[in-house]
Image (cartoon, grey):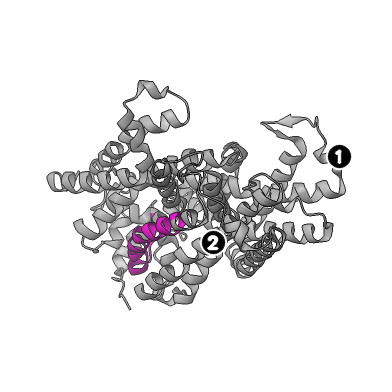
Amino acid sequence: MDATPALDASALDVARASSLYNDDLAPVPWDRRKWGLASFAALWISMSACIPTYMLGSSLIGGGMNWWEAILTVFLGNLIVLIPMVLNAHAGTRYGIPFPVLCRASFGTMGANLPALLRALVACGWFGIQTWIGGSAIYKILAIFFPGLAAPGMSTLFGITLPQFACFLFFWAINMWVVYMGIESIRFLLNIKAPLLIALGLLLLWWAYRTAGGFGPILSQPSAFDPGQAKAGQFFSFFFPALTGMIGFWATLSLNIPDFSRYARSQRDQMIGQMLGLPLTMALYAFIGVAVTSATAIIFGQTIWDPTDVLARFKNPVLLIIAMLALCIATLATNIAANVVSPANDFSHLAPRKISFRTGGLITGIIGVLIMPWKLVADPSGYIFTWLIGYSALLGPIGGIMIADYFLVRRRHLNVGALYDGAGEYRYTNGISLVAVVAFVLAVLPNLPGFFVTIKVIAPTSVPAPLVALYNYAWFVGFALAFMIYMILRKLAPNS
C-alpha cells in the first residue's frame, strides 16, 4: 500500500477552520478506501459503454475511414490518454484528495479555480450532450404512439421542435432528481447500466450482421482515403485531428481522475484497473458503432451515425420501447458518474462553505441546458473538430502543468495541510501561481487561430496555414508547451 502522509492534528484543525475546506473536498482516510482493481475496471467498462463512444466510431466512418482504421484510431487515442490518466490518479490515491484540491499545488489556493472551472464547463457540455441523447430516446418512443409529435411543420424553439425540447427537459429533470438523491442512487445505476448498454449494443450488432448479410459486406466498405476513392491521399489530414479528438474524449477524466482514485486501496489497483478497463472497452464498443454504422449504408442506403436514429427505424414497438428505455437508463448512469461528480466538486471549490455537491450538480444541469447540446452533435464533423478538439486545447495544458508540478517539481511530495490553508506554502501571489497561469495562457495561444477558423469566426486566408494545421494537434501542442514552460518558469521563480 502506498502510505498516505497523515495530517497531524494541528494541520487538520487549520484545514477544517479554513474557507477552503468542506466535507466533499476533504482528504479520504484509508478506512474509507473501498475501491479495488475490479472497481476501477468496472468504472471504465461502465463509463466507456455509452452512446458517445458508439458515436466516436461511427463518426470516423462518416468521415471516410474504413472499419479497422476507425477502431485503431479509437484504441490509439485511449492508449495515449491512459498515460496522463494513471499519472494524475497517483496523487488522488496517495493523498486522498480530489482534483480541485490537487490543482492548488500548481495553480495556487485561489488560482486552482481556473482549471477547476474549465474542467467543470466542459463537463457541463458533456452533461448536456448525454441529456440530449436520453431526451431524444424518450421523444422517439412517444412518437411511435403519438405520430403527431413528429409531424412536419411542428413549432420550433432554439433550433429543435417543442416536443423534442420538452423531452429533453423531462430527462434533465430525472438527472437532477438522481443528483438530489445522492451518491447511493448513482452507484445503483452504475451497477445495472453496463450490462444494459452492452446488451443493447450486441443486439444492434446482431441485427446489423443479420440484415446486412454478415460481417463481410459490413467490413468490406472501402476507406474513402484509398486510391481512386473520394478522399484519396487525404488520410493523414483526417487521422491526426481525429486522433486528437479521441484523446479529447477522455481528456476530461484524465484531469479529474483523482475524484475517483482518492477511494483506491492502492496504486496498483488504480493503475491496473484503469489499464484493463479503458482502452479495450472503448475499442470494443466503438467497433459496435463502426459495424452498425457501416451496415446502415448497406441497409438504408445512407450512413446513420446516431444509434437513436437507427433504433427509430425498427418496426416492432415493443422492441423499440425496451431498447430506448435501456438506452435512457444507461445514459442516465453515465451522465451522473462522468459529468456531474467532477463539476459538482469543481463548483463547490469556488465557495466551499456555500456550494454543496447538490448545489454544484444543479449548476451543472443549468449550464448543460444553456449550452444547447443538440448543436454540438448535429453532425460528425462538429462533434470531432469543434467540440472534442476544441476543449482538448484547454485541458491539455492543464494536464501538462499538473504532471510537471507533481512528478518533477515536487517529486510526489505534497503538504496536505497547506492545500487547505489560504496562508500556506501554496498561496503564491495572493493565492494565485503566476507561473502556472502564464504557462497555461502561452500553451493555449498557438491553438486559438485554428479554433477560430474551425468555428468560422475568422477566414482561413487571414491566418498562416501552419497555425491552422497546428490546431489538429491541439492536445499534444498544449500539453507539451505547458509542461516545458511551467518547468522553466518554476525554476526561475519557485514561489511566484
Measured from the top left, where is residue 17 in percent x and y?
38, 57
Q: Which residue is mark 1?
A: 148
User: For the C terminus, which image quadrant?
Assistant: top left
Q: Is residue 157 left or right of residue 150?
A: left
Residues in magenta, as a range: 73-99
Residue 292 lies in quadrant: bottom right
User: What residue is rendered at 57% in x and 58% in y?
Assistant: 219
Could you tell me which quadrant the N terminus lies in? bottom left
Q: In the visual, does 44 lie left or right of 84?
A: right
What amino acid is found at the position of numbered circle 1 in the picture? Gly
Residue at (36, 68) in percent of width and height: 93
Q: Nearer the viewer, residue 477 or 331?
A: 477
**Which sits in the foreground, 431 or 3?**
3
Q: Position of residue 180 (x, y in %)?
A: 63, 56
Q: Residue at x 42, y 72 (%)?
A: 264
Q: Is residue 76 magenta?
A: yes
Please check the rendered image and state whether residue 468 is part of the magenta-colored stretch, yes or no. Answer: no
Task: Assess disc 2: are there few (<14), some (14-19) or many (≥20) residues with their C-alpha within 10 Å of its C-alpha.
Answer: many
C-alpha gap between disc 1 and disc 2: 35 Å
Q: Secondary structure at mark 2?
A: helix
Location of mark 2 (residue): 47
- Report the mark closest to the observer, 1 or 2: 1
Q: Position of residue 447 (x, y in %)?
A: 35, 36
Residue type (three-letter) at the residue carrying disc 2: Met
Earlier sequence position, callout 1 versus callout 2: 2
Q: Is residue 114 among what the camera can see? A: no
Q: Main secondary structure of the magenta part?
A: helix
Residue 285 tag number:
none
Q: Is residue 138 left or right of residue 6?
A: right
